[in-house]
Every structure is written in C-alpha cells, then in structure tokens.
Amino acid sequence: MSITIYRKTGWMGSGSKIDIKMNGEKIGRIEENQEVVVNLSEKKGTIKVTQWGIKSNELEVQDGDRVKIKPTPFYIASMPLILLLNFMNIFIHRSEEHTS
C-alpha cells in the first residue's frame, strides 16, 4: 500500500526541500518537481509537510492517493512583499555603510 506525493511549487518555493511527516513522524524530504512514493503501514494515514517552519494542514490519505504540494494563494500574494523587504534591507544596509 502506498501513496504518491509530488511537488509543484514553482520558483518561489524551490529554494529548499520540504519535509514530509506521515502520522506525525518525519519520513523524508521532497524537492521541486520531484515525485516520492510513500509506503503506508495501514490502509489510511495522515500527512503534513513543512518548509521554513511553515506547516500545512494535516491530510488524511489512503492507498493509491496522489498528493500535490503547491503554494497557497496567500503565499503567492505575499511573495512580492517578501522580495521588496529583502531588497530594502540590502539598500538600507549599503546606505548605512556610506554614512559611517
């Protein structure tokens, strides 16, 4: 008995691997555009994924299920703000170096 997990997070989430937990125990990691087959010890189980401390909801799975990991609309909408804050951090840091 097994399930298949595949990841399609795009360039935004591809900077690090995502941890996979089955029934509360870490069982592996998955990279962007990767597919992983996970064996189930019982007919049903629950999975949860985490990246950078952000956790997904727990999902109940059963034999033969295919689970797609993708970014949430909130994550997609917040990415421009994160990039802007990183850019501002670099700009402010360089400005401080010139005033010293």
Image (cartoon, grey):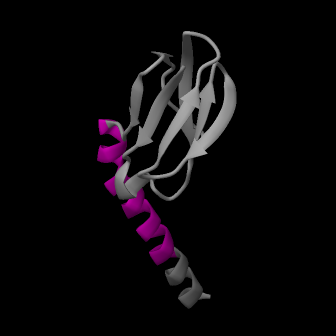
In the image, 79 versus 65, the foreground residue is: 65
Q: Could you say where residue 34 lies in the image, as x and y percent from the top left?
A: 46, 49
- At 39% across and 28% down in the image, what residue appears? 66
Q: Can the viewer see residue 76 in this picture?
A: yes
Query: Which corner quadrant holds the C terminus?
Result: bottom right
* Residue 27, placed above or below residue 47: below
Counting from the top left corner in percent of width and height, residue 56 is at: 49, 29
Residue 6, quarter of picture: top left
Residue shown at the point (48%, 23%) measured from the top left: 57
Q: Residue lying furthest top in this view?
A: 43
Point out the residue furthest to the right here. 25
- Marks counted in the figure total 0
From the viewer's perspective, is residue 24 above or below residue 31?
above
Give coordinates of residue 21: x percent, y percent: 62, 29
Q: Residue at 45%, 52% (x, y): give it.
A: 32
Find out whether residue 79 is within the magenta segment: yes
**Range covered by the magenta-colored residues:** 73-92
Give the image location of residue 68, x and y in percent: 38, 34
Q: Is residue 52 in view from this perspective?
A: no
Residue 8 within the segment the image draws in magenta: no
Q: Quadrant of residue 1?
A: top right
- From this viewpoint, which residue is outermost toward the front? 1
Q: Along the line of sight, which residue is nearer the eye, 14 or 1?
A: 1
Q: For the stretch drawn in magenta, what is the main secondary structure?
A: helix
Residue, x 32% and y 56% (percent of image)? 80
**76 with respect to 60 (left or right):** left
